[in-house]
Image (cartoon, rainbow, N blue to C red):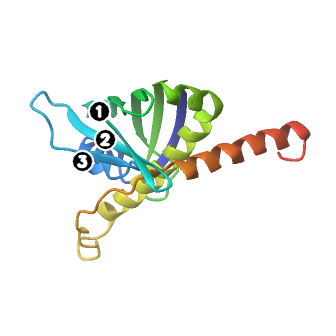
Amino acid sequence: MHFEGSFSVPGKAEDVIRRFADVPRMSRCMPGAVLEPQAEDGSWPGAMVVSFGPKKINFKGRVTTAVDFEALTGNLHGRGSADMRAARIGVKVGFTLRNDPVAAVPTTVVTIVSDAELGGVLADFARTGGDAVANVIMADFARRAAEEFAQDEMPQDEAPAEPPRQQPVPLAAHALLWAVVKAQLRRFGKWLGIVR
């Protein structure tokens, strides 16, 4: 499953890259992510919690990251699995940051290229609606990152106090499925010529 996209966040790229290197902070922007303390080998154990109605499934795994502050680039590699019909996932994400030359205030354009290998029950899901799912997750991540970074751009006396640490909200499978349905309907509408 391949994804390419870009989004904008407040701040200069030289500052934003340091925020991207803060793995615990970035994990708060990823829907469903749960991060544990960094391991001795430099990796980050964690999980992705996905809810199917009242039932929750934990995909446990490990993430490694590398950031090049001068080149304004970085990458993330993650692997995880769940005890649900041998569901497993491997993800490679590369990101590049650049200052937006036309923005009125300092703004960074983040370009992401991601490849995911899904196995077990997830493989069929990826074939039927993987692109739509990736787009929904990335859009949610972009919105959360923009909100998170906007706090850093506020004057110190206006910035809200850091909220108490809360349990992460699980990634809702029904929302992803609805996004897949909407994408398929939009594609069908374009084929019929009634949606542009």
Instruction: Looking at this view, name the residue that lies furthest to the left.
Output: 40
Sequence-earlier tag: 2 or 1: 2
x, y percent for residue 109: 46, 44
Q: CA distance from mark 2 to mark 3?
A: 13 Å
Q: Name the front one of labels 3 and 1.
A: 1
Q: Is residue 120 above or below residue 187?
A: above
Q: Is residue 3 above or below residue 174?
A: above
Q: Amino acid at mark 1?
A: Gly
Would you call the spot at circle 3 few (<14 residues within 10 Å), some (14-19), or many (20 or more)? some
Residue underneath mark 2: 47
- Residue 96 picture quarter: top left
Q: Quadrant of the N terminus?
A: top right
Would you call the spot at circle 1 few (<14 residues within 10 Å), some (14-19), or many (20 or more)? some
Sequence-earlier tag: 2 or 3: 3
Residue at (31%, 41%) from the top-left corner?
Answer: 47
Q: Amino acid at mark 2?
A: Ala
Residue at (37%, 61%) from the top-left corner?
Answer: 150
x, y percent for residue 196: 82, 45
Question: What's the mark number on residue 24?
Answer: 3
- Residue 70 picture quarter: top left
Disc 3 to disc 1: CB gap under 8 Å: no
Q: Name the front one of labels 2 and 3.
A: 2
- Residue 191 picture quarter: top right
Residue 157 appears in the figure: yes
Q: Amino acid at mark 3?
A: Pro
Q: Is residue 158 above or below residue 116?
A: below
Residue underneath mark 1: 61
Sequence-earlier tag: 3 or 1: 3
Disc 2 to disc 3: CB gap under 8 Å: no
Closer-to-camera residue (153/40): 40
Residue at (54%, 37%) from the top-left corner?
Answer: 5
